[in-house]
Amino acid sequence: MKRHFLVFALGFALALVAGWVVFPRVLYSHQGQPVDFLHKTHAEKSGNADCESCHAFNADGSFAGLPQNDTCAGCHSDKLGTSPAEAKLVDVYLKTQTTPPWLVYSRQPANVWFSHSIHVKRAGLACADCHGTLGASDEKRLYEQDRISGYSRDIWGHSISRLRRAPHDGRTMSDCEDCHHKRHVEVGCFGCHQ
Amino acid sequence: MKVSRRDLLLGTAGLTVGIFFTPVPWKVLDDVSVWTQNWPWIPQPARGPVTTKLASCTLCASGCGLRVRMAAGYPVGISGNASHPLTSGALCPLGFAAHQLNWHPARLREVRHRGRTASWEEARAAFEKACAEGPIAVVDGRSGRAASRVLQSFAVRHSGAYEVVLTAEEKALLPYAQWAGVPVSDLGYDLENTRTIVSFGAPLLDGWGVPGRFTHLWSERAAGAADPQLRLIQIEPALSRTAAAAWHWVPLCQGTEGLLAATLAKVLVEEHLIPAQGPLPPASLTEAATQTGLTPTAIRDLAYSMVERRPTLAIGPDDNPAIAALNVLLGSLGTPGGIVRKSSASSATSQISTKNVTPRAVLIDSTVPWEYIPASGIEVFRFAAWDGGGNRADWLLPSPGFLEETTDLPTPPTSAHAVYGIAPSLLTPSTELKTAAEFLQQIDATLPTIEQSIHMRCDAIFRRRRGSVHGAKPSPITGFESAAKFEDALRAGAVWLDESPSVTPLKCVLKAWPTGNPAHTSGNWANAWAPPVLPTLAGKLYRESSLREAPQRSQS
């Protein structure tokens, strides 16, 4: 009887290890950004920690998203230092007028319409409310892509169980709904899925 | 240690149970559901700069203001333009889903001749042959446009007939136009000054007239109030969306609207609620009660409700002359809050010339609804962007779809305010697509062009120096330096709005109480659209959302 229990427990334990440890490592592929970029270094060296200095809003209030080459060239029209990443940015992208194929951690799927303008300007949310400490990070973070859904890991959240998450971790539809419920802002299906 | 069969089974059982204490089943289920939504053959909008452009809807004559969200040069989302002077941001369900129409499976992309693929050259040769053999009828769905001028000019020059298919709202104005001797396109409803509306089945809160115009009035003056400033009495057999929201719903038997209108007129006069003028209907209260299913008391109470707060306006869903005669008795013709004449600035309408001869062929513009059935025995050249089916057409000629052509937008049928706009082309159509006007211009190069007509119209409006231009912000037309700049503003999505019309009396003499009671037809937004062509999103919006109503209400 004891042997039977041990065999069952072994199978159970194997499943736990596979599900909690192996599965997340297998599920996500890892890719580096086209150019190593450190938010913290840029904020410190430019003396401007304001997100909007690079991730600006257009004149009509819409969000411009990732900075264009012109913004980068404002400082890096020529090499400022000896960093290989900067050399790659200048030689491969800025001089050839090619936009780096950035891998966007928080990109929503095509069937979702999300307005930064409404959330930041009207609702008064801070960038960190959704993006956490990304703007102050000094790590060369890899882009993790779900092999099945194709989405970034940031959509599901770093915690595979979605338990004990940081407030900004995860951008699934239920995360949006939870935040809206907390703030008593009701949005129907067509608010986002237009 | 020997591993027995039982060990294997127990280990597998442990694994199976254990896996449910991990995120694997739940995460895989979620991922697979996402994966099924993103198969490679499902079209995805291109990634690119997202911009918003102002435009106007061209799916019907209302010309609702649109804010079109464009991604990488393609429209990916539509919402109402809150700065539009008539629609104020409201749209019908079809308007919200209109950007999907260009990719609809029923989209026409090639010339078809009796079911087989043909070429534009063959169609042109066949049409020229028909022109040479006999008179041609040209059918237009919306008069007063620059394209209408081309169609009408061709018909006149080739001794043909030019016919306009009226909308349900225009048909409802037809009796007044005949009695007062004015073009139907010159008449409109002064809803803003009305205090009681008696609707005989017109879907006022469901796409009637210009979407947003009445729903805005309703939300501002009536919605939710027990004793509203604007009373809507809906007389209709079924509890429609409009009936459900109305101040008072009067259910009656199908097809007895005309009889009830006549009886109400008689009660109003006999009870001295309105001055006796003109002929009285030969109606009996008892007989009307039997046929309509209402009690005599209910009919009498209804008559009192109608005149409790005046001005009162009766609106029918079609050309029911009894309802029109009721308005004449109520004195609602040519008075504030009634049926009024539009300002002179809007009178750039086409004269309809219909000849009583059987044409050799008929050319039908893409603005004509699919329910229009041409006379049998003649060759039909039908322009359409989508194949609505169920219609006999010898030639199906593909025309530009939504936002694929530049066209102008004259005053919508029910509006008392003259407006003018230009719906810009936001997409470049395929060279295989042609409008009816372009097709006729290739046959007769001396016809006026659409661009010329638009320039002339803008110039004429600019020279009057009246009204205001509603773009991102409203500004008086006097603020524009030239007609060209005024036209540029219209091409960028702005709309010109004339000053409020000065109400002039309309002389209308009724010699006898009109007879005839046309079959009831509902004229809501979906009528002109064959069900196979409706995008799924339109139906979903209709059932599940309040987006088409006044924006303030949908946000609350």
Image (cartoon, rainbow, N blue to C red):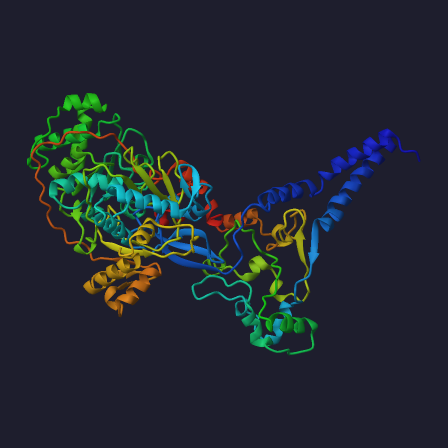
Question: Nearest the camera: B160 or B450?
Answer: B160
Q: Position of residue A165 (x, y in %)?
A: 64, 52
Indicate left or right for A82 with B311 as reference.
right
Q: Position of residue B478 (x, y in %)?
A: 23, 67
Residue B301 versus residue B86 in the image, above or below: above
Q: Position of residue B131 (x, y in %)?
A: 27, 44
Q: Position of residue A52 (x, y in %)?
A: 52, 67
Indicate left or right for B45 with B64 as reference.
right
Residue B197 visible in the shown view? no
Residue name at image x 7 percent, y 39 percent: B509
Indicate left or right for B536 with A151 as reference.
left
* Residue reaching furthest to the right: B1
Q: Quadrant of the N terminus of chain A?
A: top right
Question: Nearest the camera: B424 or B228?
Answer: B424
Q: How many marks?
A: 0
Question: Nearest the camera: B412 or B332?
Answer: B412
Residue B231 visible in the shown view? yes
Residue name at image x 32 percent, y 59 percent: B494
Residue B13 in which image quadrant: top right
Residue name at image x 66 percent, y 67 percent: A35
Indicate left or right for B400 with A4 as reference.
left
Residue A91 in which image quadrant: bottom right
Question: Nearest the camera: B39 or B498?
Answer: B39
